[in-house]
Amino acid sequence: MKEKKTLYDKKGKRKKFYLTTSIAYTNAPPHIGFAYELILSDVAARFRRMKDEGIFFLTGTDEHGIKIQKAAEKAGKPPEEFVNGISERFMELCKALAVSNDFFIRTTDRQVHWPTAQKIWQMLEKSGDIYKKKYSGLYCYGCESFKTERELVNGLCPDHQTAPEPVEEENYFFSLTKYTKKIAELIEKNEMLIVPEARKNEALNILKEIEDISFSRPVSSLKWGIPVPGDDSQAIYVWCDALTNYLSGVGFTSEPKKFRKYWPADLQVIGKDILKFHAIFWPAMLLSAKLPLPKKIFVHGFITSRGQKMSKTIGNVVDPFEIIKMYGAESLRYFLLREIPHGEDGDFTEEAFMQRINSDLADNLGNLVNRVLVLTEKYSGGKVPNTEKESFLKEKAEETIKKVSGNMEELKFHRALEGIFSLSSEANRYLNESAPWKITVKEELDAILYNALETIRIISVLLYPFMPQTAERISEQLGVEKKFTQEKLAWGLLKPGTKTKRGDLLFRKVMKVDVGE
């Protein structure tokens, strides 16, 4: 589907790009799985900002439901007090990871979110898609959803390894099956693009077995939720509550002008365990409400622990705050983005984490920056030399820029990082082979130093979406402004005479990684 010309300004740049993460469930503090989703989304957001595309980046927390109700009871706290504390930890995680979100939505926000959830309910009701009936089924409290027998493995929920409980009650339902044919057409035509391709096919297969879904719970069982409009005996269930955050977070009822500018979402980043809800339930709700659908849904895999999915329910999670405290956010950002392939699972191990820090960050990039600045101090008085002689590094850099840009557009961040660090390796090899410490001709020495310095500058710009603090530290040591835009990727912008400022090593080797579980 071609995008409307009104999405672009007179210079051909996009006027807006709306990006969302899923919202984190607040039954327990954040674990590394959601940290990965935040980092993925932040890289995409920073890349769009570099292109000046008018990005609006949303994340937040899902704070209602029976599971949270039970977690609060177990902690001996009222639900509101409980979720306030957990949500604060998620906001702290955003800050600790240098996540550049524009807004943090909370589903307990009665001014911004509640009116949206209730308004959408009424719009679906107006379309004739809300009805009431008695229902009985197997309910997984971990997933907060009903399960069919065929979804269970040996009678257990495959995600939480618990047996669903029989539940019988009268609820409101949403006519999901009314929209399955239309959703299938939109997915098949990529009008709502789902990537990777395997997730698109998975969504199409799920559509073949879909049923209408429960859209409310009696307040006798769900006390912690948003009341159904016109029926205080029922609370709005998770789908109409949580999923509508993507509307409320961009001003559906609170800032209509902002909403008109940014909706629909250009990119929604989610985990593979909630594909059904975002690729089927969510577009059906939007079709019923007569609202445009998201343009693209990127589905990432899990971070596993010894091959098993990390889960708060199972209790095998890794605390991202501990990793950040010991090794820094930049190392964590790099490891997760480099180690986990596009849309696939990735295992978090001490050995892999240590290897990435030592080989990639310390030996490769850190070594390159330090040795070039040392050579610049020794042979050029700590100033960028003047030269017109180029090396193969210019061609390599321009080739890398093109490949990285393509990978970034396709959200193949591990490939983009592979290219950036390959350029760093080439620059290290260039120094080894040219051996500036052996050169006696000043013009040749100046050319070697300039080409190496300019390559480092290009690397810092390419690296910015992934490791913003590292990119800024490199810029500071090169003596250039901390400005990272697409225009800064042109070769030759490093001005001769610029005073370099060699600082501490970017990364130091680690001897042991012990992040705990």
Image (tube, rainbow, N blue to C red):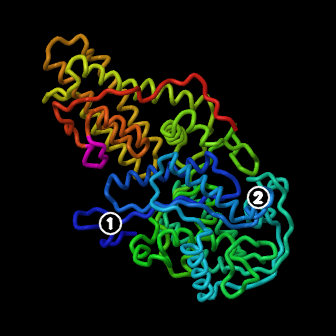
Q: Residue at x 43, y 39 (%)?
A: 417
Tell me: residue 438, above or below residue 261: above
Is residue 212 something one can see in this rendering? no
Residue 71 is tagged as: 2
Q: Residue at x 62, y 37 (%)?
A: 348
Residue 15 is situated, as x and y percent measured from the top left of the image, at 32, 66
Residue sitting nearer the eye, 69 or 246 = 69
What amino acid type should be assigned to the residue bearing mark 1?
Lys
Residue sitting nearer the eye, 147 or 29 = 29
Place residue 102 in its image quadrant. bottom left
Tell me: residue 243, above or below residue 173: above
At numbered mark 2, what does the secondary structure look like: helix, strand or loop? helix
Residue sitting nearer the eye, 381 or 388 = 381
Residue 245 is situated, as x and y percent measured from the top left of the image, at 56, 69
Q: Residue at x 68, y 76 (%)?
A: 236
Determine whether, in the image, residue 53 is placed left or right of residue 351: left
Q: Tell me, yes or no, whether the highlighted magenta stretch contains residue 277.
A: no
Q: Tell me, yes or no, whether the highlighted magenta stretch contains residue 482.
A: yes
Tell me: residue 52, above or below residue 447: below
Is residue 481 something one can see in this rendering? yes
Residue 388 is tagged as: none
Figure quadrant of the C terminus: top right
Residue 364 is situated, as x and y percent measured from the top left of the image, at 41, 26
Figure quadrant of the N terminus: bottom left
Specify start and end residues of the magenta stretch as a single range. 481-489
Instruction: State how many labels appear.
Output: 2
Residue 15 is tagged as: 1
What amino acid type should be assigned to the residue bearing mark 2?
Ala
At numbered mark 1, what does the secondary structure look like: helix, strand or loop? loop
